[in-house]
Amino acid sequence: MSGAPISGFIFLGPPGAGKGTQAEIIAKKLGLAKIATGDILREAVRNKTRLGKIAEDYMKRGELVPDDLMLSLVKETLRKIKVGFILDGFPRTVRQAEGLQKMLKEEGAELKKVILIDAQDQVIIDRLSKRRVCPKCGAVYNLITNPPKNDEICDRCGSELVTRDDDRPETVKRRLEVYREKTQALIKYYNDKGILFEVDGNGDLNKVFERILEVMT
Ligand code: AP5
């Protein structure tokens, strides 16, 4: 990053709260770059890179990938960013948050707001059991709330949709536990800095979108 200071947002919240869906739409609307660590890791797994081979096992179990790996991954990605950004799924631990703060300082960039998108456990479980993703272009659907036009076929690229490995009920349960054990501490961390804004992630996709946009702008 260089020139005028670049600023960005973090989308924080439990799995299935709608972070990725909303980050995609809002990044396009506001001309921001979306940095989704889950997407980057899944691509690395697909391409069988060194990072992908390490990350795969953690992801399948619903555990977090080690902080050091995540920090170097995000550092590399942030360096290439020339516009404002939304971080989706990073940071997830206090150590990652501290690392991010250092990185942003080094790059002369700043964090504007942290948007906490929360939803009830049952809503999350229902959403994730019906999520389907495109293995080719990464598009995300929901068989109930955001279905593809043709039965389990991607609207964008025509590929057959799949269920994410970590959307099996037992892995979802573990991901929720991990969120509570490790990521929820970030709520206090960013609240203490005065930049945390909570948005209700329950309910209709468009309503959630409007709530987030109101807080961001
Ligand atoms: P990641 O991909 O980041 O998963 P996550 O945080 O668990 O979040 P999800 O993608 O499951 O949910 P989301 O909130 O984005 O919901 P979505 O919009 O898709 O991480 C996966 C794994 O990678 C981690 O478990 C870990 O192993 C590793 N990892 C990633 N980052 C890491 C890091 N920083 N450190 C360490 N490890 C890391 O929506 C869900 C579904 O609901 C969709 O079907 C969608 O269509 C639907 N939906 C969304 N909003 C609504 C709505 N309002 N109404 C109805 N349906 C909705």
Image (cartoon, grey):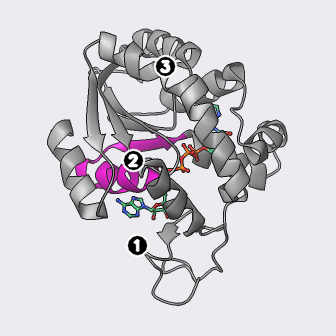
Which residues make up the magenta segment? 20-36
Q: Please name which of the two marks, 1 or 2, marks the residue nearer to the observer.
A: 2
Quick one: SS at disc 3? helix
Q: How far across and down, in percent of the image, does residue 96 sit?
A: 56, 19
Q: Does the closest atom of ligand 1 sit within 8 Å of the Cβ of label 1?
A: yes
- Whichever of callouts 3 and 2 sits on the residue coming sooner in the sequence is 2
Q: Which of 50 and 119 is in front in this view?
A: 119
Quick one: SS at disc 2? loop
Q: Nearer the viewer, residue 69 or 178?
A: 178
Residue 75 visible in this rendered orientation of the protein: no
- Residue beneath label 2, please? 119
Identify which amino acid the numbered label 1 is placed on: Thr
Question: Residue at the location (43% across, 44% down)?
Answer: 34
**Position of 91 relative to 117 (above/below):** above
Residue 200 visible in this rendered orientation of the protein: yes
Question: Residue at the location (70% across, 19% down)?
Answer: 68
Q: Does the closest atom of ligand 1 sit within 8 Å of the Cβ of label 2?
A: yes
Q: Report the disc number at residue 185.
A: 3
Q: How far across and down, in percent of the image, does residue 73 sit?
A: 63, 29
Q: Is residue 28 magenta?
A: yes
Disc 3 to disc 1, how far (Cα)? Answer: 30 Å
Q: Does the closest atom of ligand 1 sit within 8 Å of the Cβ of label 3?
A: no
**Position of 145 relative to 165 (above/below):** below
Q: How far across and down, in percent of the image, does residue 137 sit?
A: 58, 66
Q: How far across and down, in percent of the image, does residue 125 sit?
A: 54, 57
Q: Nearer the viewer, residue 80 or 118?
A: 118
Identify which amino acid the numbered label 3 is placed on: Ala
- Residue beneath label 1, please? 145
Question: Residue at the location (36% across, 13% down)?
Answer: 108
Question: Residue at the location (68% across, 57% down)?
Answer: 169
Quarter of the image containing the N terminus? top left
